[in-house]
Amino acid sequence: MTKKTIRLLMPQWQGGNNPHYSFGAELLAWLAPKNNQPLIEVPVQAFDGDSLEKEDGMNGRTQLFEQLTAAHHLLEAHKPDRVVMLGGDCLVEQAPFAYLNERYGGNLGVIWIDAHSDLVRFVGYDNGHTLPLGNLLGEGDKQFSSLVKTPLKPANVFIAGLATPSQEEEKRIVEEIEKAGVYPEEPEDELINRLGIRTANADELAKSTDSIKNWIKENDIKHLAIHLDLDVLDPSSFRSLLFANPDEDYNFSAAGSLQRTQLIRIMKELSEATEVVGLGITEHMPWDAINLKKMLEEFPILND
Amino acid sequence: MTKKTIRLLMPQWQGGNNPHYSFGAELLAWLAPKNNQPLIEVPVQAFDGDSLEKEDGMNGRTQLFEQLTAAHHLLEAHKPDRVVMLGGDCLVEQAPFAYLNERYGGNLGVIWIDAHSDLVRFVGYDNGHTLPLGNLLGEGDKQFSSLVKTPLKPANVFIAGLATPSQEEEKRIVEEIEKAGVYPEEPEDELINRLGIRTANADELAKSTDSIKNWIKENDIKHLAIHLDLDVLDPSSFRSLLFANPDEDYNFSAAGSLQRTQLIRIMKELSEATEVVGLGITEHMPWDAINLKKMLEEFPILND
């Protein structure tokens, strides 16, 4: 029987507290190859000019929770076999991945292709997009993880492409984070070790993807969901990322280093190794398009 | 009476011999503010995988001339008072600017905001986008300028934002161009002097736009068309330009240095100083969107 695949467009920005994520989602949907997969938009409250309120340690908690609930309702309405999620900040992944894990009997495999683990809350940063994977594992935020009926099995999770800053870079980032009063509730590497989650950084993946293929075999993963945070890519070859804003220097986070050709190869190999039932693409921050759009909005003849 | 304004979308790529210009045009049209200006597409032969033929010193001459003729027919069909042209390579400007100069009795003012003068043929490079302004002045290419019924008055032309490479950079570019066997039919600065065209580079414009305002007053310019080649912008703050390809080093051309805020200010000041009846935006080369689209086309789940 043909599998039913839907695309969800979820222009959520509150999880990163940056309205540009909405535009990034729209452009991503425009760029996606056209086929017969229906595109269903998840209602998201647009930025209205007001700052988000920090509610119980999360900026925009109420809006985010409402949007998460809406995504679940749409998934239940359509009951797809496969889901493509076009985000938006990383927190958009929670609903489709939780849905798919239930749909596939709690045995879903998840590969989290991301420069960051998205496992823990960073106190003082307080943005929900730091913890979708935590929520999906039954860790993370209590309210949000309560919507995950069947948490992922840690053995079924693989984090690929984690940023590996140089010692010097690492030192600078730690200093910046401390200066800003930001700290993780539990250090990410400790949490990864405690749960026993497999990882490979970009350098390892550039050499070989055997670690991923072995993980799929050893855990008998028959259905796989792929999370792709575009920030896993080397920002010198793909600049539509938060940390590659041409007008600002960000210092809080290490950059990804995966090359586009490597990413394409990984995506193809995953589809050969098992059945891919989910793909989420997140954190698209197309600075040039944002800036060009803003310029065009200022040119009088285009706005008469 | 309300002025009739139309938008032309002309995804022409043959003038720069680079199919990506077509996609740049489509994305530009998608980014432009929505209003009631109709968007009319000029038929352009899509890239079919074959290299363009060099015909009488111009790559793709036949296709380019057909497309130019089509643009003229559409302008004559709609007879607008004002035209917005969304390109495509720079040669898209010829039809609307020639049309507007006739429409306004041969007295159209043209400000050419561009890192390059677009006045002469570069032998050995042979791409039509190096000479739209030449054609409009009755110089340039004989066949193409023959379609300009009323050439622009040189006194009514101002070139703004010309690239001013450092001596070292200039030397490197000259060497690269000579190595490639490329040379201008007439040196650009000589042609500018011979015709008596006013210019200001980005540094001068950053200090003051008085030279432009004085030019408008002295020549009593009542109707102005603005050409904007996005390559006038500093590629470190706007990277969707031919010369900012993240995967290649181009060496044949000096980069622009105008800042986005300066460009917006110039556009507003021009609209205050006189009536703007034309705007063309060209040479949009959105590398990240091109590369992301290519990646998405390779992800199996998006292409079932």
Image (cartoon, coloured by chain):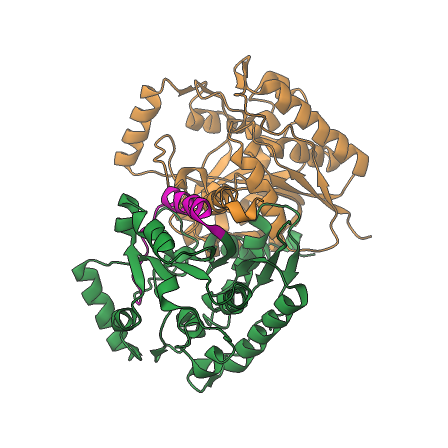
Chain colours: A orange, B green
- Residue B38: percent from the left, percent from the top? 66, 54
Can the viewer see residue B114?
A: yes
Q: Nearer the viewer, residue A97 or A210?
A: A97
Does the stretch in magenta take in A133? no
- Residue A237: percent from the left, percent from the top? 41, 52
Vertical placement of A143 versus B38: above or below? above
Vertical placement of B249 versus B235: above or below? below
Can the viewer see residue B44?
A: no
- Residue B54: percent from the left, percent from the top? 45, 84
- Residue A146: percent from the left, percent from the top? 66, 19
Q: Residue furthest top?
A: A56
- For the point 64% across and 69% down, the residue is B76
Question: Would residue A284 appear left or right of A103 to someone viewing this image?
Answer: left
Q: Quadrant of residue B118?
A: bottom left
Does the stretch in magenta take in B258? yes
Q: Residue furthest right?
A: A1
Q: Nearer the viewer, residue B244 or A119?
A: B244
Q: Nearer the viewer, residue A293 or A127?
A: A293
- For the point 53% across and 64% down, the residue is B100
- For the point 40% across and 56% down, the residue is B220
Question: Would residue B58 appear left or right of B166 to someone viewing this image?
Answer: right
Q: Where, quadrant-wise, is the C terminus of chain B in this rendering?
A: bottom right
The number of callouts visible is 0
Q: Which residues are magenta?
A: B252-275
Question: Would residue B130 appear left or right of A120 to someone viewing this image?
Answer: left
Vertical placement of A34 versus B69: above or below? above
Q: Residue furthest bottom?
A: B56
Q: Quadrant of residue B181?
A: bottom left
